[in-house]
Amino acid sequence: MSEGGELRSMADLLRSGATLTSLSCPVCASPLFKLKSGELWCAKCKKRVVVVKEEETEAVSPVLLGSLESTLLAKIRELDGMMRDEEDIDQLLRLGAVLSNMLENLERLRRIMRYKP
Ligand SMILES: [Zn+2]
């Protein structure tokens, strides 16, 4: 009677405050529960499951990446203008640090954009 046992534990999970998610177990494809602790749980395998959420990869869509790229480019242009007019060394160092951070982000972003799974 494994079927009954499974149903009973699902009901127990829900009673304990766990919620049913749209994610499925990578092992048995059963719907996963999110426990109150935030952990994902498969009632069939009776174990904790770590899922690499597909939704998150999809959320980083080409549209979002393109938008991020233009935001970064606009900020880099702004920083360029600010640095040109700035005479204070401390301020220049701060702007330089931000700029270097932006350039790193831009490089990383462009690497992601080129990446084809
Ligand atoms: Zn499972």
Image (cartoon, rainbow, N blue to C red):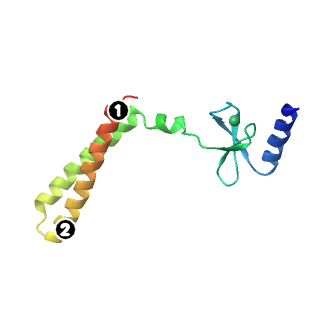
Quarter of the image with the C terminus is top left
Up-down: is 65 above or below 96? above
Q: State if disc 2 and disc 1 touch (CB < 8 Å).
A: no
**Displayed-image quarter of ligand 1:** top right
Hey, what amino acid is under mark 1? Tyr
Q: Which mark is residue 30?
A: none
Residue 95 image offset from top left, x and y in percent? 21, 61
In percent of width and height, residue 25 lies at 65, 35
69 left or right of 12? left
Identify residue for label 1. 115
Q: Type of residue at label 2?
A: Gln
Q: Position of residue 40 (x, y in %)?
A: 65, 45
- Where residue 28 appears, as percent x and y from the top left, is 68, 31
* Front label number (1 vs 2): 1
- Res 60 → quadrant: top left
Q: Quadrant of the N terminus?
A: top right
Residue at the image position 82 percent from the left and 37 percent from the top: 6
Residue at mark 2: 91
Between 86 and 65, the one nearer to me in the picture: 65
Badge 1 density bin: few <14, some 14–19, many ≥20, Cα 10 Å: few
Q: CA distance from mark 1 to mark 2?
A: 36 Å
